């Protein structure tokens, strides 16, 4: 059993605060929680909403319909009424209304706390009451959450929450809700998964220019800077940011930058610089719909082919695309390790949906555990930075630590000095490209979910993991044989192993958040797939499991 709650209102009205309160309270109650956000590109006004889905079993996706709509402004009711499921309930912030439960959240907050902002606590108390839950759980959370703001703020929020309970008393327990269980109390977003993993993996410098939806990772690492010894620099632009992390990695400092598609476009020259200098930089691209500014606060999977082929010239790179907060935690560390092991740029692809979604999971380990930087601690007297090796990976020493390290953006001899000797050029380029052999050998295999002999195979990558997984469960429950093959590493690929899993299926469907099926094209180019069906979405909103299941059945 599950319930989807949608809190909707204007930017600046407390939509995110109300949703965040409910997420953590429900998780503390032992309910399985999944949240996602939809917000417009503005500071005030517009229409934003925050979905909180709760259930008595694990959740991996949001839902199109809502069972309980909390409308903080009449405009939210007008826009979202059709999204209310049959038999659903609408709570409207008003004293009177037809076909709704009229509850004056804002007026009550002004009366109790002399602050319209605390209407979110009133609304949260009302929601818990309508669902038949003990609102004291909310009061307990408010006491902890607002402790730093002082006892007066805590008391006013608690009073507002209890007033919300009183307002909704006539509708207490009117909606059947899941029974609290033993789900983990800790809740994480994709942003937190990336940030925690980067900090504990030993990232010491983060240089970025803020760009939605990547800024959350930048601000998370800024908050963690003192604890983990990280220098966080807001660069003047993305060109400066990528060049700064190139300089840092040359000096032996693990470094990363965070950006979105438009910012990554400015980083392409620096990306190529890292390619020829063989620098282990990490670039996180949190995708949003383009072209140009596009829909800056929405979600997309439109940058895959861009990041794969970006930069002038040819050089090896790895591209990772985690699908859940847990994968974001695991894959971010792997991305840092891959960059340093193979001395090459690595790109971590997430998106607005994954960055903002939250779900409960066991507490993540935050213990500082830096990766092996693969650095020569005692380089020989005849050390050459770009010595030609069988695997393409040259010994890496740190400047002023027992070696003379020369780097240049031009083609170079093995000692780093510039050359136009064409034989040397061939030797160095072949050396760099040989790294791909090792990267392919160590490539993360895709995850198969569902029956091995399923007739229908959904091909997923990145954040479509959860919706596709839920779709597989829906399809199989409906008597249709379905499975999912999810890729958290999208380049390079171990083609033979993938072909063995895909096999001769009756149906193969690529599910992607873009208009052209970019990953399907990459698989087809690699000989993994022939022509296949596609389920594509590119309106800026994320997939849901129900949507994919319905489209797969047509």
Image (cartoon, grey):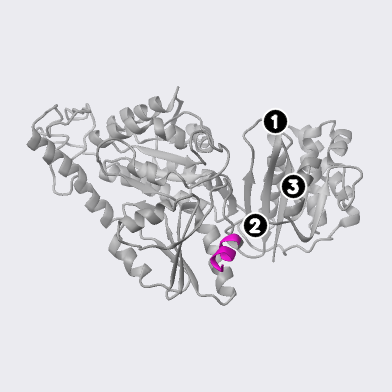
Bin the neighbour count of mark 1 within 10 Å (Cα to Cα): few under 14, some 14-19, many 20 and up. Answer: few
Magenta segment range? 547-554
Give me the residue at 56% from left, 63% from top. 551
Callout in the foreground (3, 2):
2
Tell me if I can see residue 368 in this picture: no
Q: Which residue position is annotated with label 2?
A: 63
Q: Which mark is residue 44?
A: 1
Residue 382 part of the magenta segment: no
Rendered position, 496 above or below 51:
below
The residue that mark 3 highlights is: 140
Q: Estimate the spatial distance between the alpha carbons at disc 3 and disc 2, rounded to whole Å.
A: 29 Å
Is 33 in front, or is 266?
266
Tell whether position 549 is magenta. Answer: yes
Q: Residues within 10 Å of mark 3 (few under 14, many from 20)?
A: few
Magenta stretch, main secondary structure, is: helix
Question: Residue placed at 35% from the left, 57% from the top?
Answer: 523
Which image quarter holds the C terminus? bottom right
Counting from the top left corner in percent of width and height, residue 182 is at 64, 63
* Pointer 2 local density, CA inside 10 Å: few below 14, some 14–19, many at least 20: many
Classify residue 132 as left or right of residue 251.
right
Give the residue displayed 66% in from the left and 65% down from the top.
56
Residue 54, given in percent of the width and then of the height, sits at: 68, 58
User: Tag 2, which secondary structure?
Assistant: loop
Between disc 3 and disc 2, whose residue precedes? Answer: 2
């Amino acid at each position: 059993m599950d319930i989807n709650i949608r809190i909707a209102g204007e930017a600046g009205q407390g939509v995110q605060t109300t949703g965040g309160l409910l997420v953590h309270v429900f998780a503390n109650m032992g309910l399985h929680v999944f949240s996602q956000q939809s917000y417009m590109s503005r500071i005030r006004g517009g229409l934003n909403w925050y979905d909180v889905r709760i259930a008595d079993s694990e959740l991996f996706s949001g839902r199109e319909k809502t069972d309980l709509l909390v409308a903080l402004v009449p405009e939210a009711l007008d826009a979202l009424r059709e999204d209310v499921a049959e038999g659903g309930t609408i709570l409207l912030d008003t004293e009177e209304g037809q076909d709704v439960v009229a509850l004056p959240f804002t007026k009550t907050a002004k009366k109790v706390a002399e602050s319209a902002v605390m209407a979110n606590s009133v609304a949260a108390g009302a929601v818990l009451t309508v669902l038949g839950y003990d609102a004291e759980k909310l009061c307990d959370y408010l006491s902890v959450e607002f402790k730093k703001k002082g006892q007066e703020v805590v008391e006013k929020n608690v009073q507002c929450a209890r007033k919300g309970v009183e307002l909704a008393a006539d509708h207490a327990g009117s909606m059947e809700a899941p029974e609290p269980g033993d789900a983990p109390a800790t809740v994480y977003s994709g942003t937190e998964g990336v940030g925690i993993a980067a900090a504990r993996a030993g990232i010491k410098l983060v240089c970025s220019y803020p760009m939605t939806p990547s800024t959350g990772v930048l601000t998370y690492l800024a908050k963690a800077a003192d604890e983990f010894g990280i220098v966080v620099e807001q660069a003047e632009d993305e060109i400066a940011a990528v060049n700064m992390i190139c300089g840092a990695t040359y000096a032996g400092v693990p470094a990363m930058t965070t950006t979105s598609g438009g910012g990554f476009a400015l980083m392409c020259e620096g990306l190529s610089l890292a390619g020829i200098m063989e620098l282990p930089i990490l670039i996180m691209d949190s995708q949003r719909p383009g072209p140009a500014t596009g829909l800056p606060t929405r979600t997309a999977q439109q940058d895959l082919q861009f990041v794969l082929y970006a930069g002038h010239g040819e050089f090896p790179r790895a591209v990772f695309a985690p699908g859940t907060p847990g994968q974001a935690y695991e894959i971010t560390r792997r991305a840092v390790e891959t960059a340093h092991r193979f001395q090459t740029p690595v790109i971590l692809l997430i998106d607005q949906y994954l960055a903002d979604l939250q779900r409960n999971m066991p507490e993540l380990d935050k213990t500082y555990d830096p990766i092996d930087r693969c650095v020569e601690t005692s380089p020989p007297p005849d050390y050459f930075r770009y010595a030609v090796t069988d695997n393409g990976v040259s010994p890496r020493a740190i400047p002023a630590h027992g070696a003379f390290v020369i780097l240049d953006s031009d083609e170079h001899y093995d000692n780093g000095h510039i050359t136009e000797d064409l034989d040397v050029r061939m030797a160095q380029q072949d050396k760099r490209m040989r790294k791909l052999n090792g990267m392919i050998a160590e490539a993360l295999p895709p995850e198969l979910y569902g029956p091995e002999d399923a007739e229908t195979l959904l091909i997923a990558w990145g954040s479509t993991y959860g919706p596709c997984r839920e779709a597989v469960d829906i399809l199989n429950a409906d008597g249709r044989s379905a499975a999912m093959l999810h890729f958290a590493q999208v380049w390079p690929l171990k083609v033979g192993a993938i072909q063995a899993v895909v096999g001769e299926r009756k149906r193969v469907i690529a599910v992607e958040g873009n208009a052209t099926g970019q990953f399907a094209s990459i698989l087809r180019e690699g000989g993994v797939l022939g022509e296949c069906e596609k389920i594509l979405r590119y309106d800026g909103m994320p997939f849901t499991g129900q949507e994919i299941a319905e489209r797969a059945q047509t």
